Amino acid sequence: MKLMAIAVSTVMGAAAAAGCAQDADMNTLGERYVRLVLAMGQHDPDYVDAYYGPPEWRKQAEAEKRPLERITADAAALAQEIADAAPPATADELAHLRHQYLTRQLEALRARAAMLTGTRLTFDEESKALYDAVAPVHTESEFAAALAALETKLPGTGPLVDRYDEFRKQFIIPSDRLDVVFKAAIDGCRSRTLEHIQLPAGESFTVEYVTGKSWGGYNWYQGNYRSLIQVNTDLPIYIDRAIDLACHEGYPGHHVYNALLEKNLVRDRGWVEFSVYPLFSPQSLIAEGTANFGIDVAFPRAERLEFERRVVFPAANLKPELAAGYYDVLALVERLSYAGNEAARRYLNGQIDARGAVAWLERYGLSARPRAEQRVRFIDQYRSYVINYNLGKDLVAAHVEANGGTAENPAKRWEEFARLISSPRLPSGLTSRSR
């Protein structure tokens, strides 16, 4: 028995040594990937969404200003080396996920570089190349049932979009109550998240109110478990956006996602590639999808309605008794969420112009003209990124539920959600059960 123990120990020691060598190789490749992402950021101001690795790497990228042609060549060479460094079949799941993640993220970088040098892709080709997913196509007739139901909920004359806009005016957060309402929503989201997810010590974020943006809210992750969250006040902010933004940008959304990646992968494992977040990459579908699904995880329908009535509506000096009717209407409007994708698909494919995209969003997305125009500005800036919100949420929800995290089992739902936001899983990997 003693000799067998020694033999087993020797084999295990050899396996561990091989694993360490594999990690060292991947760490070197990961650093080169980070430097390529930073180099891309010199050509695309939106590309590097977050970076908290060595400051000198960013300074070197700024000083070098590597040409796009060289970035493309360097990325091709790195892709081959990553392919050659595939982990053995006996490696653990995270090692395989890491290799798949780096491979696919680098493919997206190469696609983005090609776009910046003039390559033209259709909406679906672009979303597949950058985000590892293609959104389903929806026709006008597919939105008809939701629009018909809204017609009965919002009776009257004139276009439905105008009636919906008038209905929502009674649910605008007064500007002098905005910060109070958001703080109340953030406290609720954080307390619910802490019941299920252990967050790194010292994590926190600050909130700023800004103008002149194409988006409604944005999380700028700073590293060291800190975020800056900006809320755009160009347009009126409705009461439902308090919990939506507090969850999506904060708890258990982007802030938690980034903090857990920093803790579990960068600090605990030394995987430096996760210290940079390229916006136009598969990572964004996971980030946006989990941030949107996280709203439902933290606040199932009945619990959200109770919290809205008890906390959020009173904080905004709005009538709590109107909350149920408001959310009934919003549930119908949610069935129109893919209309935004269709506007972007048609617009970017050249089937309609910007004015046509605004009209589509008014008709099928029920966006009032100023909000529709803002959404088209977002499409101009971020293009097929729009799929990450609705398709991302649907893929994340299906993955969590396939692994037992159903609405009827909220503890398991939180467990699977936390597992997902702590690991480097790709969108294409969400179509199958994990483990």
Image (cartoon, rainbow, N blue to C red):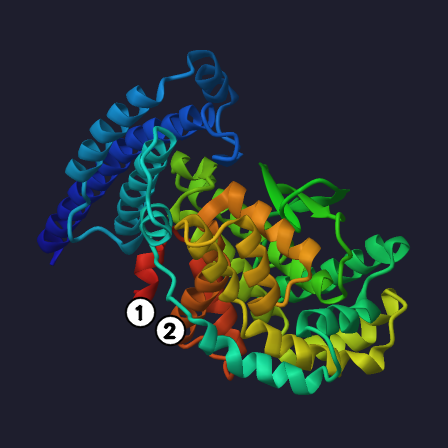
Q: Which residue is mark 1?
A: 433
Q: Is residue 87 left or right of residue 427?
A: left
User: Quadrant of the image for the N terminus?
Assistant: bottom left
Q: Can residue 229 be spotted in the picture?
A: yes
Quadrant of residue 153 within the rendered picture: bottom right
Q: Are marks 1 and 2 in contact (CB under 8 Å)?
A: yes
User: Given the image, on which type of amino acid does mark 2 rest?
Assistant: Asn
Quadrant of residue 302 within the rendered picture: bottom right
Q: Can residue 286 be spotted in the picture?
A: no
User: Quadrant of the image for the C terminus?
Assistant: bottom left
- For label 1, count other residues whose C-alpha is less than 10 Å away and answer few (under 14), some (14-19) or many (20+): few
Q: Residue at x 58, y 60 (%)?
A: 359
Q: Nearer the viewer, residue 131 or 61?
A: 131
**Secondary structure state at the residue bearing disc 2:** loop
- Check the image and report above or below for 296 versus 380: below
Which is nearer the N-term, disc 1 or disc 2?
2
- Check the image and report above or below for 285 versus 61: below
Q: Residue at x 27, y 29 (%)?
A: 75
**Secondary structure state at the residue bearing disc 1:** loop
User: Given the image, on which type of amino acid does mark 1 rest?
Assistant: Arg
Q: Which residue is mark 2?
A: 403
- Residue that extends furthest to the bottom in the rendered view of this protein: 152
- For label 2, count other residues whose C-alpha is less than 10 Å away and answer few (under 14), some (14-19) or many (20+): some
Q: Residue at x 46, y 77 (%)?
A: 141
- Place of residue 366 in the rendered image (x, y in percent of width and height, measured from the top left): 63, 68
